[in-house]
Image: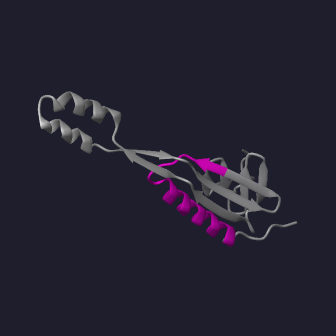
Amino acid sequence: MGYPPGNEQVLLTIGDMALTQTHVIVPHGRYPLNGTVWAVQDSTQVHEGIPPVAIVLTIIFVWFCLLGLLFLLMKQRRYTGFVTISVTGQGLYHTVQLPPGPESGAWAAQVVSQARSLAASAPPAIA
């Protein structure tokens, strides 16, 4: 990823994308920030179930007392999928996929909101 010229500092980083006041910097180049369109898609799926260790402990302790059945109340959450952030603009299309998690979708929505705000306030590109 290239660095911003002169005194232009990076204001926001999203995966391998960096935003300055006037540009979006991606691994394959730098593009004007003005006029970019940002999107976020959360494909996270949550799977909840009884972990195998709870089943084993239940089998072991149910022989001693019925309190072993309490191990079946244990729950395990697994997150699958991904969160995708994409940006399009003049000659630009780039996506970043983030791992799933309980806060990934909310974080992605927040940084895309910030990126949209920066894009709306960016000066027009000088040809």
How far from the left and from the top, in percent, is residue 33?
73, 63
Which quarter of the image is occupied by the C terminus? bottom right
Please report the residue visible at 68 percent of the width from the left and 52 percent of the height from the top.
95
- The residue located at (44%, 52%) in the rendering is 102
- Residue 32: quadrant of the picture: bottom right
Q: Which of 66/13 is in front?
A: 66
- Who is closer to the viewer here, 16 or 2? 16
Check the picture and name the quadrant holding the N terminus. Answer: top right
Left/right placement of residue 62 relative to residue 91 reads: left
Q: Main secondary structure of the magenta part?
A: helix
Residue at left 61%, top 52%?
14
Relative to 17, residue 74 above or below: above
Residue at 12% x, 29% y is 64
Pick the front one: 55 or 95 = 55
Q: Is residue 115 left or right of residue 23?
A: left
Which of the colour schemes (rainbow, by chain, secondary structure, one colour) is used? Answer: one colour
Residue farthest toward the left in the current orientation of the protein: 65
Q: Is residue 50 magenta?
A: no
Place of residue 27 in the rendered image (x, y in percent of width and height, measured from the top left): 74, 45
State the image coordinates of residue 94 (x, y, percent, origin top left): 72, 53
- The x, y position of residue 2, in whole percent, is 74, 46
Report the span colored magenta.
Answer: 96-120
Near-viewer residue (91 or 22): 91
Q: Quadrant of residue 10?
A: bottom right
Please, is residue 89 above or below residue 101 in the view?
below
Q: Is residue 102 left or right of residue 20?
A: left
